[in-house]
Amino acid sequence: MSTEKKQAYSGVPAKIADELRARIARGALGPGMRLGQTELAAQFEASRVPVREALKLLSSEGLIEHDPNRGFFVAQLSSDEARQLFRMRDLIEDELLKTVVWPEARALKALTQHAAKLDTLLDKGERLNWWSENREFHNLVFELSPNKIMVREAMRLWALTDRFRAILPLPRRPGAARDVVEKNYLVDALSKRDMKQLLAVRRERRRAFEQMVLETLEDRGL
């Protein structure tokens, strides 16, 4: 197989994993749902090999679970898991943000545009597009740090907690829930190069999201 073909083939599992990750985040694939390799291969018009590689990747991230005898399943949600994940995010993200290189005008403009697009998507109730844009926004902020190992870990933890978002309604109207996902305060802190504000805003939003998740899980007996 040529190098070009190997590179193209190696990208198929990643693309499948990205789509499955998005489906889990928006709730299209619910906790406990079985992920059949044959069915997924047909959906993605691929062989079972890249599908299995994608499932193994998501399993390593904790988004799905693998039972050798029964197959792959979307991971269940629990209050205990949420508490531990958010605590880990507290530790990693605070340390990561302390190392950011303050963005210049071009990067700030990109972040401002992302924030405006997120507001528009919320107004329209476009959950999937909002989720993708929200992930990109967080990645851009974290990537301001030169500590790329920490960036990867922060995004991994972010993905694990963000799948809990599927149990919450999309905040289309102004209110406390909408404030939790508001990004302009974060952009403002970056533009002012105010570390204290940056850490406080990010921590406040993260913990408010955690509280909403925990209250919903507890209401469901999870």
Image: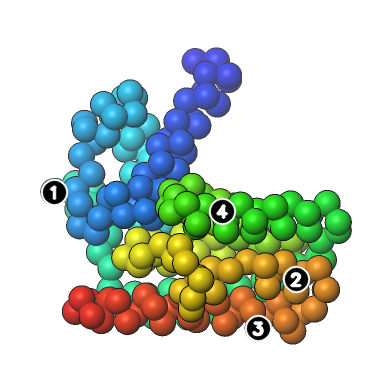
Tell which circle, 2 or 4, labels the residue nearer the N-terminal end: 4
Coordinates of residue 1 in the picture (x, y in percent): 49, 15
Mark sitting on residue 120: 4
- Examine the image and state in which quarter residue 204 appears: bottom right
Q: Which residue is mark 3?
A: 200
Q: Amino acid at mark 2?
A: Asp
Mark sitting on residue 188: 2
Vertical relation: 189 (above or below) 159 = below
- Examine the image and state in which quarter residue 197 appears: bottom right
Secondary structure at numbered mark 1: loop
- The CA distance from mark 1 to mark 2 is 51 Å
- The CA distance from mark 1 to mark 3 is 46 Å
Counting the numbered discs, the total is 4
Q: Which residue is mark 1?
A: 69
Task: Look at discs 2 and 4 and give the one toward the viewer.
Answer: 4
- Examine the image and state in which quarter residue 93 appears: bottom right
Secondary structure at numbered mark 2: helix
Vertical relation: 137 (above or below) 57 = below
Q: Residue at x 19, y 48 (%)?
A: 34
Work out whether residue 135 can be spotted: no
Contact check, label 3 and label 4, Cβ < 8 Å: no
Q: Amino acid at mark 4?
A: Thr
Q: Residue at x 47, y 25 (%)?
A: 9
Tell which circle, 1 or 4, labels the residue nearer the N-terminal end: 1
Tell which circle, 1 or 2, labels the residue nearer the N-terminal end: 1
Category of crowding for the residue at label 4, using alpha-carbon neighbours closer than 10 angstroms: few (below 14), some (14–19), many (at least 20): some
Category of crowding for the residue at label 1, using alpha-carbon neighbours closer than 10 angstroms: few (below 14), some (14–19), many (at least 20): few
